[in-house]
Image (tube, rainbow, N blue to C red):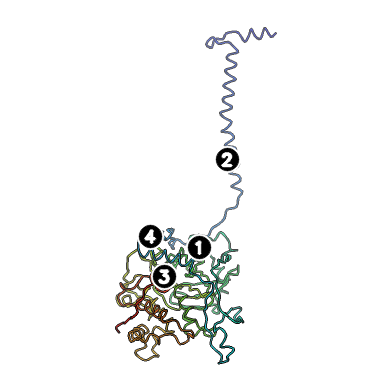
């Protein structure tokens, strides 16, 4: 039988006279090759079907749509990382000084003396206040004071615990319902500030974070413009002396901005009595606040592109945190300018007494307008006087003119705020006055830039004139 099979398989066929076993081998090879070619295709198709079924089973997260009326600027401000000019060198020096220039502690508040008790006079004349539920606690001890440390403190994010889906391009997205809950339905009792563009409410998020909610007033399209300007100006700005923008809300015609809440008053309140029941700022505290403000302005003017001109620098817009660090606020009037550019406007914005003369007279706006306003605030902090006070004699109504007159007649020691118990040294006073008077120079081109002002206030090695005389 085996020999019979061998005989049959050995027969030649009509197909190229090939033997039968050769044809069988060819057919088997073709069949196996076809199977090998089709197998990967079948496996890949089966895998794609399985993946599609899994995706169909997953839930789809819904992200709230942003109003098409609002322009979202996806371009990040360009922070300068190169050093090509003296201004850039100043900024680099500021960054290094800020890292190593913190001291272990600083005296910040000067208390009012209750009497001439000898025991009390031997103690330090400053104190630390802790505000809890509206009550003020005074620390006791031989030396009482506000202490701050250079060691970093890790603090939980104010947005921790909030829904992750609400993180969008400008920061954290809040619903109107979130903010109604936070502010007790925008209760009048929660109002902490009002202006031409909006109302600011104190609030508390569901995670316990205190916030300030700015509700933009909808007056003939200005709300939309105000909202966009403020968000575009500071949504990407990051500086320890700027009030932090936590997020925003867009619902219908409602436009709201949510900021961190600074609950220690502002410079105006500390200088002019609203916070006097806590004490008075010492010279050191005033300089700390002003230097912090100068650093914030240097960042806005010289580290961002386009640069940001604040346009409303005044003592009430300089908030003070619990460690007496300055927090520059209220960016509602900011103007974005390209490098080396100025802007001319027919509508002058700002606060009377702080506005630069060239801006008030001709509408010419650039960063030197902020420098002038900062100089007025510095003079205000030195003297404890308002920029314009019609309750004073005619020569003393305008603070800048009065200071120039006093310095020109070499009576600069008389301009120091009498509420400062420990007076500054003559050198420190001259340095601060010279810096302020250079800031308020009538010629805008002669005013220093903010990074130079920081160095003038911070560095004892920065040259100052022994004799300064200003013509009235």
- The tag earlier along the polypeptide, 1 or 2, is 2
Which is more N-terminal, label 3 or label 4?
Answer: 4
Residue depth check, mark 3 versus mark 1: number of the one nearer the observer: 3
Could one spot residue 254 in this view of the protein? no
Res 30 visible: yes
Q: Percent from the top left, x then y, of residue 108?
A: 52, 79
Look at mark 1 in the image and give the residue it sits on: 171
Question: Can you tell which of label 4 and label 3 is closer to the viewer?
Answer: 4
> Where is residue 21 shown, x and y percent of the image?
60, 13
Query: Earlier along the polypeptide chain: callout 2 or callout 4?
Result: 2
Proximity of marks 2 and 4: CB atoms separated by less than 8 Å: no
Q: Say whether disc 3 or disc 2 marks the residue closer to the N-terminus.
A: 2
Q: Secondary structure at mark 4?
A: loop
Q: CA distance from mark 1 to mark 4?
A: 30 Å
Q: Position of residue 401 (x, y in %)?
A: 34, 84
Estimate the spatial distance between the alpha carbons at disc 3 and disc 2, rounded to whole Å: 57 Å
Give the residue displayed 49% in from the left and 75% down from the top.
Answer: 319
Above or below for 25 versus 47: above
Residue 83 tag number: 4
**Callout 4 crowding tier (Cα within 10 Å): few <14, some 14–19, many ≥20:** few
Disc number lying in front (3 or 2): 3
Circle 1 or circle 2, nearest the eye: 1
Q: CA distance from mark 3 to mark 1?
A: 22 Å
Q: Secondary structure at mark 3?
A: helix
Q: In the image, which disc is placed on residue 48?
A: 2
Residue marked by disc 3: 297
Rendered residue at 51%/66% (across/down): 247
Residue 164, relative to residue 422: is it above or below?
above
In which quadrant will I find the C terminus?
Answer: bottom left
Q: Secondary structure at mark 2?
A: helix
> Which of the two labelled residues, at mark 3 and mark 1, occupies the earlier sequence position?
1
């Amino acid at each position: 039988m085996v020999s019979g099979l061998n005989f049959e398989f050995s027969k030649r066929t009509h197909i190229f006279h090939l033997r039968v076993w050769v044809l069988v081998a060819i057919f088997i090879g073709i069949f196996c090759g076809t199977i090998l070619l089709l197998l990967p295709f079948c496996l890949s198709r089966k895998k794609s079907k399985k993946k599609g079924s899994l995706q169909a089973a997953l839930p789809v997260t819904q992200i709230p749509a942003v109003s098409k009326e609002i322009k979202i600027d996806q371009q990040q401000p360009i922070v300068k990382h190169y050093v090509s000019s003296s201004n850039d060198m100043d900024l680099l020096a500021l960054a290094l000084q800020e890292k190593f220039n913190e001291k272990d502690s600083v005296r910040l508040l000067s208390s009012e003396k209750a009497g001439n008790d000898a025991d009390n006079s031997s103690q330090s004349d400053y104190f630390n206040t802790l505000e809890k539920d509206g009550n003020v606690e005074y620390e006791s001890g031989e030396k009482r004071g506000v202490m701050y440390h250079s060691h970093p403190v890790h603090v939980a994010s104010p947005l921790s615990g909030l829904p992750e889906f609400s993180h969008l391009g400008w920061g954290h997205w809040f619903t109107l319902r979130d903010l109604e809950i936070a502010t007790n339905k925008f209760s009048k009792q929660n109002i902490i500030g009002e202006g031409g563009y909006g109302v600011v409410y104190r609030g508390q998020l569901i995670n316990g974070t205190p916030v300030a909610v700015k509700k933009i007033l909808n007056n003939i399209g200005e709300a939309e413009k105000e909202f966009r300007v403020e968000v575009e100006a500071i949504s990407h700005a990051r500086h320890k002396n700027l009030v932090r923008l936590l997020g925003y809300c867009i619902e219908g015609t409602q436009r709201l901005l949510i900021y961190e809440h600074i609950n220690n008053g502002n410079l105006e309140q500390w200088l002019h009595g609203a916070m006097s029941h806590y004490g008075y700022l010492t010279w050191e505290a005033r300089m700390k606040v002003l230097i912090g403000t100068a650093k914030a302005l240097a960042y806005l003017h010289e580290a961002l592109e386009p640069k940001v001109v604040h346009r409303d620098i005044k003592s009430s817009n300089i908030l003070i945190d619990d460690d007496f660090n300055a927090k520059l606020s209220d960016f509602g009037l900011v103007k974005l300018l390209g490098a080396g550019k100025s802007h001319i406007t027919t509508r002058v914005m700002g606060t009377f007494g702080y506005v630069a003369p060239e801006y008030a007279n001709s509408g010419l706006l650039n960063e030197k307008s902020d420098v002038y306003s900062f100089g007025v605030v510095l003079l205000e902090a030195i003297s404890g006087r308002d920029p314009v006070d019609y309750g004073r004699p005619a020569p003393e109504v305008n603070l800048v003119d009065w200071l120039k007159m006093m310095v020109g007649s070499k009576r600069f020691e008389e301009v120091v705020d009498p509420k400062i118990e420990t007076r500054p040294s003559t050198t420190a006073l001259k340095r601060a006055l010279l810096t302020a008077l250079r800031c308020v120079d009538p010629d805008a081109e002669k005013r220093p830039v903010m990074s130079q002002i920081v160095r003038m206030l911070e560095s004892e090695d920065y040259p100052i004139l022994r004799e300064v005389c200003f013509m009235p």
